[in-house]
Image: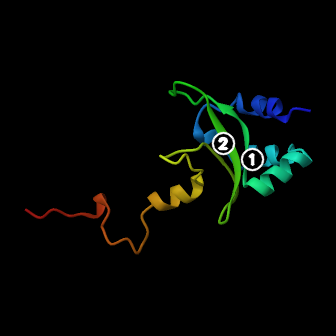
């Protein structure tokens, strides 16, 4: 049985990165074969399909992997070394925190 075809059917409804949510990840995890679960455990990631996101020129391979902080996630390889990065960790890094040394733009007051 080729689960990639089944995953591709799930990915056909994905048009933006926001469409990749916990429900989709849960559905893919539940459909993994024993062989795929072993590969995921040993290699740390497994390709689950190619997705064409709106505005992109071609399909990119997307991988299922386990983030130590957020559990299983799906993303595409990025950067010079084509690394997998957890989208939730990236979101946390871009969100300002209370201990952030620089004020937000809406917090800056200009005095004349």
Q: Is residue 31 above or below residue 106?
A: above
Q: Residues within 10 Å of mark 1 (few under 14, many from 20)?
A: some
Quarter of the image where the C terminus is located: bottom left
Most extreme residue toward the left is: 112
Specify how the rendered protein is coloured. Answer: rainbow
As drawn, which residue projects farthest toward the top? 57
Give the secondary structure at mark 2. Answer: loop
* Disc number for residue 25: 1
Nearer-the-camera pick, 42 or 32: 42
Q: Work out how far the residue at label 1 is from the one at label 2, CA to CA, in angstroms.
A: 7 Å
Residue furthest toward the bottom?
99
Q: Position of residue 19 (x, y in %)?
A: 64, 39
Q: Which numbered disc, 1 or 2, marks the residue that appears first in the sequence?
A: 2
Residue 15 or residue 2, whichever sits in front: 2
Horizontal side of 20 relative to 107 (left or right) equals: right
Q: Nearer the viewer, residue 69 or 13?
A: 69
Residue 11 placement (x, y as % from top left): 71, 32
Q: Quadrant of the N terminus?
A: top right
Where 62 sits versus 52, above or below? below
Give the camera-side residue of 80 and 48: 80
In the image, residue 98 lies at what x, y percent? Answer: 42, 72
Task: Give the residue drawn at x 82%, y 48%.
Answer: 29
* Contact between labelled residues 2 and 1, with CB atoms less than 8 Å apart: yes
Is 39 left or right of 17, judged from the image as shown?
right
Residue plotted at (80% across, 33% down): 4
Q: Which residue is mark 2?
A: 20
Residue sitting at 60 percent across and 42 percent down? 76
Element type where label 1 sits in the image: helix
Q: Position of residue 95 (x, y in %)?
A: 45, 60
Q: Residues within 10 Å of mark 2 (few under 14, many from 20)?
A: some
Q: Residue at x 67, y 32 (%)?
A: 50
């Amino acid at each position: 049985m080729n689960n990639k075809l089944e995953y591709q059917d799930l990915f056909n409804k994905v048009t933006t990165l926001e469409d990749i949510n916990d429900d989709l990840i849960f559905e893919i995890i539940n459909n993994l074969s024993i062989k795929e679960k072993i590969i995921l455990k040993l290699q740390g990631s497994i390709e689950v399909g190619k997705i064409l996101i709106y505005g992109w020129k071609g399909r990119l391979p997307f991988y299922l992997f386990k983030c130590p902080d957020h559990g299983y996630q799906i993303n595409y390889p990025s950067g010079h070394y084509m690394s997998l990065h957890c989208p939730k960790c990236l979101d946390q890094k871009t969100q300002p925190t209370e201990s952030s040394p620089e004020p937000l733009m809406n917090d800056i007051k200009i005095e004349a």
